[in-house]
Amino acid sequence: MAEKKKLVSEITSMDVDFAQWYTDIVKKAEMADYSSVKGCIIMRPYAQALWENIQHTLDTMFKETGHENVAMPIFIPESLLQKEADHVEGFAPECAWVTHGGNDKLEERLCVRPTSETLFCEHYAKIVRSWRDLPKLYNQWCSVVRWEKTTRPFLRSREFWWQEGHTVHATAEEAMQETLRMLNIYAKFFEEWLAIPVVKGEKTPKERFAGAENTYTIEAMMHDCKALQSGTSHYFGDGFARAFGMQYTDKNNTLQYMYQTSWGVSTRIIGAIIMTHGDNEGLVLPPRIAPTQLVVIPVAAHKEGVKEKAAELYEQVKAAGIRAKIDLSDNTPGWKFAEYEMKGIPLRLEVGPRDIAEGQCVLVRRDTREKTVVKFEDLEKTIPALLDDIQKSLYEKALANREAHTYTATSLDEMKSILAEHTGFIKSMWCGDQACEEKIKEETGMPSRCMPFEQEHIADTCPVCGKKADKMVVWGIAY
C-alpha cells in the first residue's frame, strides 16, 4: 500500500492546517486549477461533473415549482446599475468595468455583472403590463464577476458560477411566499442531497443584501466549526419596482408597483461539500450528488477471467441505475484504492480470483472503510441500501458536529470565554440595536449569521447592553 501512503502524505492534515488541507484536496482530487487571472479558477472535469449534478437537481426542483430559465447579458450599463442607490453602493467595491470596445473608448462604462437584479428590472418593466402577466418566475444559470481581494477556490473567487432566480408578483404576500418557498427548497436540497444540515433564518438589517427589505439564509457548519453562508433568498418589496418604473394594471384598472424577489446558490456549494464531509485522505461525496457512486476495481487483474468478470459486474450495476465506472488500467490496486478514496467515490467494488470462485465480491464504503462481502446476485439490492446508509450517515455525522459545537451565552464575556476554547456557533439573545451587533463582531470576530426561524428563549436581556431582548441570534466565525 506504498502508493496509497504516498498520495495521502501529500495532503496536509486538517488538524494541522485546515486551509492548506482544503487547498490540497482541491488540487489533488483534480477539482480545480488556477488560471493566469489572479482570483479566477479553472473548473476541472470532476468538479464540473459535480456542479452539473447540482444544477440538474436544483433545476428540476425549480421547474417543478413553475420557474423558467432565461439568459441575460453579461454587461450592465453604468446608468442602469445606478438606478437603485443601495444596490449600487453595496456592489461598487467589487465591480469590474469595461471601458473600451476594441480600440474605442465607450461612451458609457459597462459593468461585468456582479448580479443581475437591474437587468431583470429593466426587462420586467418592458414585458409586464397587466395582472394577467404576473407572476413572472425566472431563473438563470450563469457566471458573475466580483473583484474580491482575498480568494480561495470555490469559496470566494473573482468569477464564479451560480443560479440567480428573479421573480415579480402582484402582491407583497405572494412575493414573500416565494422568498420563503425558495429558501425551503435550498434547505431541502442541502439536507437531502448534500447531507449538510442547515440553520434557516433571517439576516439582521446590517447583513441584508444591498437593496433588499429582508434577506433569508441557510447557514452550514463546516468540519472546522466555521460557518458558511450557503444560500440566500431576498424579498425586495417594491423598492426596485419604484426605481425602475415597474408597474402593472390591476383588476380594477389601477396602476400598481410589482413586488420582487431574488435568490441564489453558487459553486461555493462545492466548497461546502469538501469542508463538511472530507477527511485526511481526500473527498467524501454524498452518494445522491456524487458523479460516480461506485468504482469497480479488479484485483490480480492479470489472472484469467478477472478483468472479464469485473467488466460484467460493471455492466450489471450500471444497468441497475448506479452511476459507476471501472478501472482496467495497469495501475496497482493500492494506487487505485488511494485514487478513488481521494476522489470521494462512495463505494468501491473489489473482485479477484478467489471472489470469482466463491461467486461474490467485496464492497468498501468510503466514509467508514467498512467492507461487505456480497454475492453477485445480491448486488442490485445491496448497493442502493449501502448508498442510502452512507447518505444518512454523512448527514448524521455533520449534524452531530454542529450540535457538539453550538453553544449558548448570556453575556459578551461568556461569548469571549467560549471562543477562547472553542470554535462554533454561539446562540444569544439580541435587542435589535445595530450598535450591539457591531460590538459583538468587534470584540469576538463573529458576525451574526441569522435570526433562526426556530427561536429559543436563552435570556431576557441583550448580552451587550442589558436591554430587553426578544430575538435569538446565531453568531459564528465565517468563510
Image (spheres, rainbow, N blue to C red):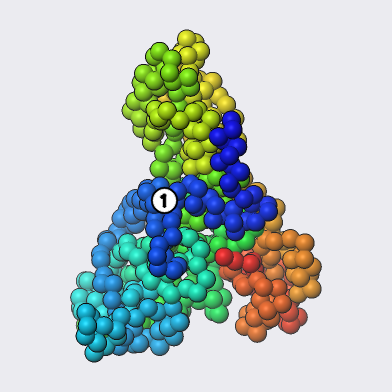
Residue 403 in the image, given as x and y percentages of width and height = 67, 53
Q: Eyeballing the image, is 190 above or below 328?
A: below
Is residue 39 depicted above or below 194 in this figure?
A: below
Three-letter code for the amino acid on which mark 1 is drawn: Ala
Q: Is residue 328 left or right of residue 410?
A: left
Asked whether the viewer can see residue 149, the reply is yes
Q: Quadrant of the N terminus?
A: top right
Q: Position of residue 18 (x, y in %)?
A: 62, 56
In terms of depth relative to the viewer, which is nearer, 95 or 41? Answer: 41
Determine the image quadrant of residue 170. Answer: bottom left
Q: Quadrant of the image for the C terminus? A: bottom right
Q: Nearer the viewer, residue 405 or 49?
A: 49
Which residue is depicted at the point 48% across and 60% down?
Answer: 153
Image position of 433 with respect to 66: above or below: below
Q: Which residue is mark 1?
A: 47
The quarter holding residue 248 reads bottom left
Q: Is residue 432 left or right of residue 416?
A: left
Q: Write the residue at 27% across / 61% down.
A: 69
- The spot of residue 419 in percent (x, y) is 74, 66
Residue 264 visible in the current orientation: no
Q: Residue furthest top?
A: 357
| Numbered disc 1: secondary structure | helix
Residue closer to the observer: 18 or 469: 18
